[in-house]
Image (cartoon, rainbow, N blue to C red):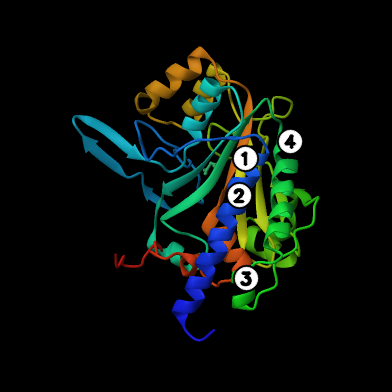
Amino acid sequence: MDSGYDKLAHSLEVGSDVIKATVDFFHDEGFIELLPVMLGKSTDPLGPDPGSSVIKTAEVEYLGMQLRLMNSMILHKQVAVKKLGGKIWILSPNVRLEKGERKATGKHLFEFTQADFEIPNAKKEDVMRFVERYYVNLSRKLKKSEALAKLGIEPFKFKRPFKVYTTHELEAKYGADWEIPASKDAKQPFWALCHKREFYDKEDPAEPGHYLNYDLIYPLGFGEALSGGERENEYSRIISRMGKDRLAMDVYKAYLGEAEKGFLPTAGGGFGIERLVRFLTKEEHVGNVQLFRRVPGEEITI
Ligand code: ASN
């Protein structure tokens, strides 16, 4: 490529192709597309997670209300499915104020957009098959991508089904920080099941201490693509999980009010658009595919 700008321009064109393919796919699969919310009384607590490096949830005081910027729309997704009764998805901008040291991972941004979806009455296997269809469809759509050709990059050919491991197997083989070494060993994306995570991911009733959730990991060292899970939908379970996580319940009052009236059983997930474009364009840093870079530890220019 002749200059950094041309490369960025072509990566943004790849991003545009990805957005179009994603919108078309979700619509063809019968999802209702919702507009994103940016502010709420509560948002995804993103933890407690010893691996998390989010410094704080951004808050805005407005007309006497304490509002929080979306870490993710997970809580709103559960409410949305209940109100609409069908499959929903959102191209959802998230703000996650990560520590500056996260710049070094190559995959963290403090503002990014995820394709975030939720499906009523679905199990984890339903979501995994759906996501595999998405990636195979994307390969087909990008086969003739002019933007990738301009970058001199062969479109990646996703082949389903993706392999499935548990985090316990991955930890036994690669240690606690299994994500990148396991990703480097892989030639296709793979699933990692059972993460101890936020209160909304369902604990396996048949095996307490195990979780009915999943991450999808890109191969070739690119790391996490998607995270999601079956959800805790019963009020008493939600209260108990939040209690264990010592969350400040008053912040979640409205969400809990909706939970008390009943949530549908759902499963879903979200994948970052910028990370996907980084993977397809084989960029070293995810910030290199953003027009307005939002890399932890870097000064914003505009
Ligand atoms: N979108 C994710 C999910 O659906 C949540 C997240 O982004 N933390 O589980």
The first of marks 3 and 2 along the sequence is 2
Which x, y percent locates residue 77?
Answer: 51, 32
Give the answer, above or below, for where 255 lies relative to 29: above
Identified by mark 1, the residue type is His
Q: Earlier in the sequence, mark 4 or mark 1?
A: 1
Image-based side of 34 in relation to 297, left or right? right
For mark 3, give the secondary structure.
helix
User: Regarding mark 2 in the picture, which secondary structure is present there?
Assistant: helix
The amino acid beneath tag 3 is Glu
Q: Where is residue 263 shown, x and y percent of the image?
A: 55, 20
Reading the image, the residue beneath label 2 is: 22
Instruction: Write down the quadrant of residue 293 in the picture.
Output: bottom left
Helix, strand or loop status at disc 1: helix
* Mark 4 → mark 1, Cα distance in angstroms: 17 Å
Q: Is residue 163 visible?
A: yes
Q: Earlier in the sequence, mark 2 or mark 1?
A: 2
Instruction: Identify the residue shown where x is 75% and y is 63%.
Output: 157
Question: Mark 1 or mark 3: which comes first in sequence?
Answer: 1
Please say whether residue 166 is visible from this viewpoint: no
Q: Quadrant of the N terminus?
A: bottom right
- Residue 68 found in image quarter: top left
Q: Nearer the viewer, mark 3 or mark 2?
A: 3
* Residue position marked by numbered label 4 in the rendering: 126
Q: How far apart are the two marked residues, 4 and 3, measured between alpha carbons?
A: 33 Å
Rounded to the nearest angstrom, the CA distance separating label 2 from label 1 is 9 Å
Q: Residue at x 55, y 42 (%)?
A: 116
- Work out whether residue 23 or residue 283 is closer to the camera in this orientation and state it: 23
Foreground mark, 4 or 3, reads 3
**Residue indicated by mark 1:** 27
